[in-house]
């Protein structure tokens, strides 16, 4: 197999036969002798691979299909086996194709299972991947593969860890200030950092969660903090095993796995526990009919027990929820709001439905009102809600912190700040932001009347607090309060889902 006379390397007969089999995907493992034969012919084989790539990859870049997709796929695998940096320029070009075109040509899992390792194995200049990683027009999973390639390259000692850590920190900084308004990139960046050990970027990761820039269906902060607690060495060892296990031509020692029967029994037990939790949660939350047995456990009928009682007077083990009067009318206005002419007050209140229906209009109108009436906290709350609705978390968080400076006792501002701290994974700080109170009467001892919306907001953040503290029973108590004051609110379903996710994670870890 030869090309030009000038830079030609000949492949011996044995290597040529072996190469032909490999490029057809006919072999699964390589013996030590076969690896030796390939290594002895490395230069000639890599030259041949570049010939294949120079023919097939331009076809893909031009929107055509491969003339021989099988040869291209296994040629790429061979380039990774040889750690052939001479081929990196061609492999990097694949990152600029659509994911559909790549997977149609090279297989459904090429991007998610192969690309990151190929890039890491052949990388000769990692900085060229920046243009891919930072380009929002490129598919998120291709960009994620490039991030993972940088991590794998550090694990393989091809790049210095400090270089990549500094790059990741610079990416976080640009995302957090809004220079890169890219939540998909943020989510994948957090994931790569977590695999890498998140210690160097932990504050940036917390802030990303705090600003709602991470898709928690993809990755939760609990997983990040677990990787952090296990330490850098543990994370690196796990990545080293992952890289080694991906080496297709290196047979790994087989690990004895539990029998199918044992695995099946384990999963059955797990799902039974989850089902029992769900049944118990629904039983506690469903308000009984008049003649049904009361949920409180007294054994009495609901109509003769808790149906006419005030708000759950004895829920917490060491805290009593004081008998406060719950208002379902208009929220209590600040003195400055009460002093406004009725027409002006009504005009301000009309902003409330616009937060959900037309947040852009709120952004236009609310600042004018705030300039005119800077001592009305409700206006700041409307503006904050509009920013959140429009997915502009940085402006929302900046406004929320400014609101708390102006109105430090404003309940809804304190609740939002506590939720922000919970998203950052700082439950103790979140509870401290609410003066470590367990009830609204403890938070505002001078008041006896609270609006249902205030109880809903406070109980929601407290339930989130106890979920994060791994105390589902306490979280259920506050969920019951929301069920009592606002049974159809989205907070009920949200908390139920969060509890189920937490319990599932706990059971999975035990399993």
Image: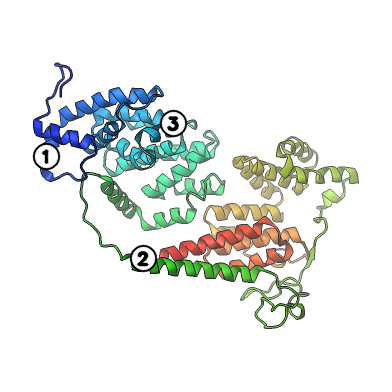
Of the two numbered discs 2 and 1 on the same chain, state the one appearing first in sequence: 1
Of the two numbered discs 2 and 3 on the same chain, state the one appearing first in sequence: 3
CA distance separating discs 1 and 3? 37 Å
Image quarter for residue 451? bottom right
Query: Are circles 2 and 1 on residues that touch, CB within 8 Å?
Result: no
Give the residue drawn at x 20%, y 26%: 48
* Label 1 CA crowd tier, 10 Å (few <14, some 14–19, many 20+): few
CA distance separating discs 2 and 1? 40 Å
Which quarter of the image is occupied by the N terminus?
top left
Q: Residue 207: where, in percent of width, then height?
A: 52, 47
Q: Determine which of the numbered discs, if any, sits on residue 98 in the image.
A: 3
Give the residue drawn at x 69%, y 57%: 489
Badge 1 marks a residue whose secondary structure is: helix
Q: Which is more foreground, mark 2 or mark 1? A: 2
Give the residue drawn at x 45%, y 43%: 188
Q: Is residue 198 above or below residue 166?
A: below
CA distance separating discs 2 and 3? 39 Å
Which residue in the structure is indicated by mark 1? 36
Badge 2 marks a residue whose secondary structure is: helix
Query: Are circles 2 and 3 on residues that touch, CB within 8 Å?
Result: no
Name the residue nearer the viewer: 31 or 353. 31
Q: Is residue 249 visible?
A: yes
User: Is residue 457 left or right of 55 when viewed as pictured?
Assistant: right
Q: Residue 129: where, in percent of width, then height?
A: 38, 31
Which residue in the structure is indicated by mark 2? 263
Q: Can residue 83 be seen in this view?
A: no
User: Is residue 156 left or right of 473 when viewed as pictured?
Assistant: left
* Label 3 CA crowd tier, 10 Å (few <14, some 14–19, many 20+): some
Badge 3 marks a residue whose secondary structure is: loop
């Amino acid at each position: 197999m030869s090309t030009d006379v000038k830079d030609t390397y000949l492949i011996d007969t044995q290597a040529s036969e072996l190469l032909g089999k490999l490029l057809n995907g006919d072999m699964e493992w390589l013996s030590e002798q076969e690896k030796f034969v390939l290594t002895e012919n490395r230069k000639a084989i890599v030259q041949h691979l570049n010939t294949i790539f120079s023919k097939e990859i331009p076809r893909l870049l031009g929107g055509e299909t491969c003339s021989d997709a099988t040869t291209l796929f296994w040629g790429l695998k061979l380039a990774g086996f040889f750690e052939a940096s001479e081929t990196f320029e061609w492999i990097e070009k694949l990152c600029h194709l659509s994911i559909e075109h790549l997977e149609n040509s090279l297989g459904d899992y090429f991007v998610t299972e192969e690309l990151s390792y190929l890039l890491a194995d052949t990388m000769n200049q990692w900085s060229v991947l920046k243009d891919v990683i930072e380009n929002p027009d490129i598919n998120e999973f291709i960009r994620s593969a490039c991030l993972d390639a940088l991590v794998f390259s550090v694990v393989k000692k091809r790049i210095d860890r400090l270089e990549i850590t500094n790059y990741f920190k610079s990416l976080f900084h640009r995302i957090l200030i809004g220079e890169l308004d890219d939540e998909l990139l943020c989510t994948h960046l957090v994931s790569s950092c977590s695999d890498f050990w998140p210690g160097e970027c932990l504050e940036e990761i917390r802030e990303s969660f705090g600003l709602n820039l991470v898709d928690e269906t993809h990755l939760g902060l609990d997983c990040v903090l677990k990787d952090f607690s296990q330490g850098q060495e543990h994370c690196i060892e796990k990545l080293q095993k992952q890289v080694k296990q991906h080496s297709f031509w290196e047979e790994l020692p087989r690990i004895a796995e539990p029998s199918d029967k044992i695995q099946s029994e384990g999963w059955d037990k797990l799902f039974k526990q989850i089902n029992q939790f769900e049944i118990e949660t629904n039983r506690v939350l469903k308000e009984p009919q008049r003649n049904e047995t009361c949920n409180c456990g007294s054994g009495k009928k609901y109509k003769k027990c808790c149906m006419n009682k005030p708000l759950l007077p004895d829920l917490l083990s060491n805290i009593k929820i004081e008998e406060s009067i719950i208002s379902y009318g208009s929220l209590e206005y600040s003195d400055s709001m009460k002093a406004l002419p009725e027409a002006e007050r009504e005009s301000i209140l009309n902003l409330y439905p616009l937060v959900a229906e037309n947040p852009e209009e709120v952004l236009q109108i609310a600042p004018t009102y705030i300039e005119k009436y800077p001592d009305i906290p409700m206006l700041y709350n409307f503006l904050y809600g509009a920013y959140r609705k429009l997915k502009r978390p940085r402006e929302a968080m900046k406004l929320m912190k400014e609101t708390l400076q102006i109105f430090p006792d404003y309940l809804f501002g304190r609740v939002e700040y506590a939720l922000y701290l919970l998203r950052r994974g700082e439950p103790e700080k979140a509870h401290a932001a609410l003066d470590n109170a367990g009830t609204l009467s403890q938070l505002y001892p001078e008041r006896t009347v609270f609006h249902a919306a205030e109880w809903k907001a406070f109980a929601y953040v407290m339930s989130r607090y106890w979920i994060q503290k791994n105390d589902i029973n306490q979280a259920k108590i506050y969920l019951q309060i929301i069920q009592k004051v606002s049974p159809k609110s989205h907070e009920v379903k949200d908390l139920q889902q969060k509890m189920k996710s937490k319990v599932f994670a706990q059971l999975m870890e035990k399993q």
